[in-house]
Image (tube, helix red, strand yellow):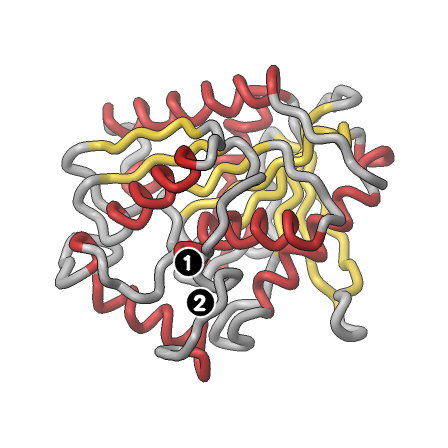
Amino acid sequence: MLSRTKGKSIKGLSCSEEWIPRSGDNSRLRICIYKPLEPKPDVPGVLWIHGGGYAMGTPEMSAATYKRLIAQSNCIIIAPDYRLSIEAPYPAALEDCYDALLWMKGHAKELGIRDDQLMVGGESAGGGLTAALTLYARDRGEVNIAFQMPLYPMIDDRMITESSVDNNAPIWNSNLNKWAWKLYLRDLHGEDVPAYAAPARAADFTNLPPTVTFVGDLEPFRDETIQYVARLRQVGVPVDFEMYKGCYHGFDIISPKAEVSQKATSFFLSSFQYAVDHYFAQQNH
């Protein structure tokens, strides 16, 4: 079902794609570029990473999110069609997202993006890759990220929190989560998993960008999200966070018209707007 969206334009946006070289070999990575129909200069650049348990999905499936972000701030969105775990396990997806981030930084001027407002976001596994990417970028020192939006992120393979054990909520439950992590980690599963694969394992959360996230209280990722937020705040990272009662995984995407979904979307967009107005990260070039 998800692959049917591949290559489809999004009504009301200017859509294009590029094939960029991967740093690891000579293969090419497809990235989708979304702009307002009448782009303005010097706007934030948002690298948006789609969800799908690391195993499925395409950039085109996040169309509604792109429209909202662009309506909010005229931003330009770069969405990588990263390698999925069914074809290539960790670190393929992370490397693809990092290549897309470097490409966005390198082409900021011609894209009309301010290079001191490079932002990263995604939902579910895309939120996990967002959290991993900000750690990776911080440690590599090649790109400075101004803001991150890891929504209900998939960040802990250990599945030791209360919400991740025997969770049978709709859409995403403990059983699906376990299989998705096995597929993503392959030979690393059950071993000493790196923080770039499962960001909840990171020992050091300092110098990460200001953050927004939210989560439903019924879903497996509830507790790992709460812990992630607490650990960011402990080291002084500004975080906007809300938890929504009675909500399962991806509730805002599955029932966008529900009152609680509209509340979550409005919270997310107002935090994004605050970031556009207040958060900047100069590049070292």
Q: Are marks 1 and 2 in contact (CB under 8 Å)?
A: yes
Residue at x 54%, y 49% (from the top left corner):
49
Mark 1 element type: loop
Q: Which residue is mark 2?
A: 55
* Residue for point 34% across, 35% down: 214
Amino acid identity at mark 2: Ala
In the image, residue 229 sits, relative to residue 3, either above or below, namely above
Q: Position of residue 175 (x, y in %)?
A: 22, 68
Corner quadrant of residue 147:
top right
- Residue 235: x percent and y percent? 46, 36
Indicate left or right for 227 with 28 as reference: left
Residue labelled with disc 1: 52
Q: Is residue 217 above or below residue 61?
A: above
Residue for point 53% across, 61% down: 196
Left or right side of 60 for 198: left
Instruction: Residue at the far bottom: name it.
Output: 187
Query: Gap between marks 1 and 2, in whole Å?
Result: 6 Å
Residue 106: % across, % down: 83, 45
